[in-house]
Image (cartoon, grey):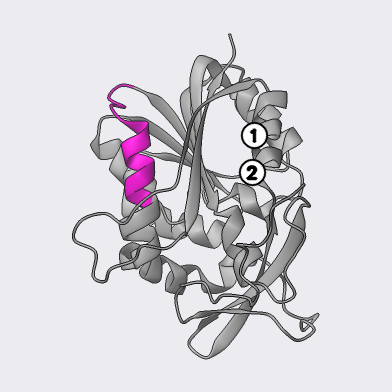
């Protein structure tokens, strides 16, 4: 019998930036969803120093990557290039892809011309040969996809045998705890937040899935999971935070 007596009876507000709010009204059909081009500059500036990005998620991804000197790394969903820049500083040869040309323009200013950047959608076949990379970093990008299967299979294809997929996603418990009405935990469900910059709101839709759905998708795509972690706040953070935020997974490509 499932034990549920310890589950919160009332939705709990999850900690998060004040520029992110749940969408509670029907969306304006004239505003595209997940349109990072519309706020690339503003988001990039926020991402640079925010608690969640600069002191929790990005340090965790760099730590999981470890020694990358000489590695060929694909930064899948590279955004404005903050993670790519850190990996390059550690000796990696980095290629970045993102579906947003606006975000890549910001990344180009940051990284210069010695990092290959391409517009590419992770739902489509990727423009790289088999075994092209030692590692793939997928930082806060998989949770935009309803179906991980084709994407993970494609990332497995472009990794060398034994290569690593290092991914971070929104923690599956956060939306389950905070949403009202609360979704069924074992189901894959979508939710939409509004990100507001300069008085204008942009809708972003995410897919929350249970942990078993994440691990099953990795295994079915040919990855052996070696790490599942819940990153803590890095030293030097501007404010304390001990709650849940992200989940990281490392999968090793089968030989």
Pinpoint residue 128: horizontal percent, then vertical percent.
Answer: 60, 26
Examine the residues drawn in magenta and state their main secondary structure. helix
- Residue 113 seen in the current view: no
* Residue at the spot 36% in from the left edge and 29% down from the top edge: 93
What are the residue bounds of the magenta stretch?
Answer: 58-70
Q: Is residue 68 magenta?
A: yes
202 lies left or right of 17: right
Residue neighbourhood size for the residue with mark 1, other residues' Cα within 10 Å, grouped as few (<14), some (14–19), many (≥20): some
Q: Nearer the viewer, residue 10 or 31?
A: 10
Instruction: Compare residues 73 and 100 and report the one nearer the observer.
Output: 73
- Would residue 119 be found to the left or right of residue 81 on screen? right
Pick whichever, 5 or 26, lies toward us.
Answer: 5
Left or right of residue 231: residue 211 = right
- The residue that label 1 is drawn on is 215
The residue to which callout 2 is attached is 211
Q: Tag 2's secondary structure?
A: helix
Q: Residue at x 33, y 40 (%)?
A: 62
Between the residue at mark 1 and the residue at mark 2, the CA separation in whole angstroms equals 6 Å
Quarter of the picture holding the C terminus: top right
* 44, above or below 166, in the image: below
Mark 1, secondary structure of its residue? helix
């Amino acid at each position: 019998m499932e034990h549920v007596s310890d589950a919160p009876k009332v939705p709990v507000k999850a900690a998060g930036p004040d520029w992110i709010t749940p969408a509670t009204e029907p969306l304006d059909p004239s505003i595209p969803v997940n349109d990072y081009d519309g706020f690339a500059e503003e988001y990039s500036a926020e991402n640079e120093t925010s608690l969640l990005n600069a002191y929790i998620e990005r340090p965790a991804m760099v730590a999981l990557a470890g020694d990358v000197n000489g590695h060929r790394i694909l930064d899948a969903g590279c955004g404005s290039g903050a993670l790519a820049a850190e990996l390059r500083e550690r000796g990696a040869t980095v290629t970045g892809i993102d579906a947003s040309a606006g975000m890549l323009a910001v990344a180009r200013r940051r990284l210069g011309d010695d990092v290959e950047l391409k517009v590419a959608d992770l739902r489509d076949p990727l423009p790289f040969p088999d075994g092209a990379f030692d590692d793939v970093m997928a930082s806060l990008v998989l949770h935009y996809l309803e179906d991980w299967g084709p994407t993970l299979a494609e990332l497995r294809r472009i990794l060398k045998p034994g290569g690593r997929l290092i991914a971070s996603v929104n923690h599956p418990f956060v939306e389950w705890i905070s949403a009202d009405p609360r979704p069924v935990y074992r189901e894959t469900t979508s939710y939409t937040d509004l990100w507001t910059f300069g008085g204008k709101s942009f809708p972003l839709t995410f897919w929350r899935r249970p942990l078993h759905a994440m691990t099953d998708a990795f295994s079915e795509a040919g990855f052996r999971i070696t790490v599942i972690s819940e990153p803590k706040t890095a030293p030097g953070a501007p404010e304390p935070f001990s709650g849940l935020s992200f989940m990281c997974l490392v999968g090793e490509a089968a030989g």
